C-alpha cells in the first residue's frame, strides 16, 4: 500500500454555501444508485457504464472506502444542505505537486451552479497547500458542460490530449480530451 504519511491530505468533510461533502461510503449505495449511478446521462462522459444493480454501486463505493484509507484518492459524496438530497460526487487525486479532479452531478441538479461551487472549493483548498502548484482536470472534447464549468472556475485550456481516455459509453477506443489547469502564480 502506498505510504501517505507525508502526503497532503484533504479534509474528510467540508462545505460550500449549498453543499456538504462527506467521504463516499458503502452506506450511500441505495441513494447513489437510484439518483446518480444508474443514469446513462450522468455516465455518458464518465469512465464507467451506468450501474444496472445496486451491487455494482456497492462495489464502486467499496473502492471509494479503500482509496480513502490508502490515501490514493479522495472521493466525496455531495449533499444539498437545503434538503439533504444527494447532489453528486467529486474526487481528487493528490500527487507530489499537483491535484487532479473528477466530478458528476445527479441530473436533476444540473445547471444551477452547484458543481462550480464544489470544484471552486476544491481548487481553493488545493492551491492553498504549500506543496501543490497545479490543479488540473480533463474532459471529453464533446463534454461542453464540463469544459464550461472548468473555465468558469478559472482554469485555462492547455490543449488536447489525443486518445487520452476510454469513455465506454461513447466508444471502446480512447478518445481525445481537453486538458484544463490552474497553477500557482509565480
Ligand atoms: C458537468 C456537470 C458536472 C456540470 O455541473 P453543473 O452544476 O450543471 O454546472 P454549473 O451549473 O456549475 O455550470 C457551469 C457552467 O457550465 C455551463 N453548462 C452547464 N451545463 C451545460 C450544458 N449542458 N451545456 C452547455 N453549458 C453548460 C453553465 O451555463 C455554466 O457556465 P456559465 O457560467 O457560462 O453560465 C454536469 O453537467 C454533470 O454532472 N454532467 C455529467 C457528468 C460529467 O460529465 N462529469 C464531468 C466529467 S469530465
Image: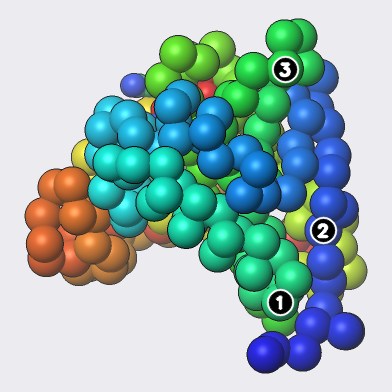
Task: Let me know if residue 45 appears in the view.
Answer: no
Q: Earlier in the sequence, mark 3 or mark 1?
A: 1
Task: Let me know if residue 67 appears in the view.
Answer: yes
Query: Residue 125, how many percent across, how many down?
Result: 81, 50
Mark 2 residue CB less than 8 A from any atom of ligand 1:
no
Whole-angstrom CA distance, mark 2 to mark 1, is 13 Å
| Residue underneath mark 2 | 10
The image quadrant where one finds the C terminus is bottom right
- Other-residue count near label 3 (Cα within 10 Å), few / some / many at <14 / 14–19 / ≥20: few
Q: In percent of the image, x 66 and y 33: which residue is there?
A: 78
Task: Give the side of residue 37 with respect to residue 114, left or right.
Answer: left
**Image quadrant, ligand 1:** top left
| Residue underneath mark 3 | 84
Q: In percent of the image, x 48 and y 56: which residue is there?
A: 60
Q: Earlier in the sequence, mark 2 or mark 1?
A: 2
Q: Nearer the viewer, residue 73 or 95?
A: 73
Q: Secondary structure at mark 3?
A: loop
The image quadrant where one finds the N terminus is bottom right
Q: Secondary structure at mark 2?
A: loop
Task: Give the side of residue 183 with respect to residue 178, left or right.
Answer: right
| Residue underneath mark 1 | 70
Name above or below for residue 174 compared with residue 179.
below
Name above or below for residue 143 compared with residue 64.
above
Q: Earlier in the sequence, mark 3 or mark 2?
A: 2
Whole-angstrom CA distance, mark 3 to mark 2, is 23 Å
Amino acid at each position: 500500500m502506498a505510504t501517505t504519511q507525508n502526503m497532503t491530505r484533504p479534509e474528510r468533510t467540508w462545505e460550500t454555501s449549498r453543499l456538504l461533502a462527506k467521504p463516499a461510503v458503502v452506506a450511500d449505495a441505495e441513494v447513489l444508485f437510484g439518483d446518480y449511478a444508474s443514469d446513462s446521462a450522468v455516465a455518458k462522459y464518465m469512465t464507467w457504464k451506468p450501474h444496472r444493480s445496486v451491487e455494482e454501486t456497492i462495489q464502486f463505493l467499496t473502492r471509494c472506502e479503500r482509496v480513502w484509507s490508502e490515501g490514493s484518492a479522495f472521493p466525496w459524496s455531495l449533499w444539498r444542505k437545503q434538503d439533504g438530497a444527494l447532489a453528486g460526487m467529486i474526487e481528487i487525486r493528490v500527487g507530489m505537486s499537483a491535484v487532479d479532479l473528477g466530478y458528476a452531478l445527479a441530473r436533476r441538479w444540473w445547471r444551477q451552479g452547484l458543481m462550480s461551487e464544489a470544484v471552486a472549493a476544491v481548487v481553493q483548498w488545493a492551491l492553498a497547500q504549500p506543496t501543490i502548484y497545479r490543479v488540473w482536470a480533463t474532459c471529453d472534447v464533446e463534454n461542453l458542460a464540463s469544459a464550461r464549468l472548468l473555465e468558469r472556475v478559472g482554469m485555462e485550456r492547455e490543449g488536447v490530449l489525443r486518445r487520452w481516455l476510454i469513455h465506454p459509453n461513447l466508444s471502446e477506443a480512447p478518445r481525445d480530451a481537453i486538458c484544463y489547469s490552474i497553477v500557482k502564480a509565480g
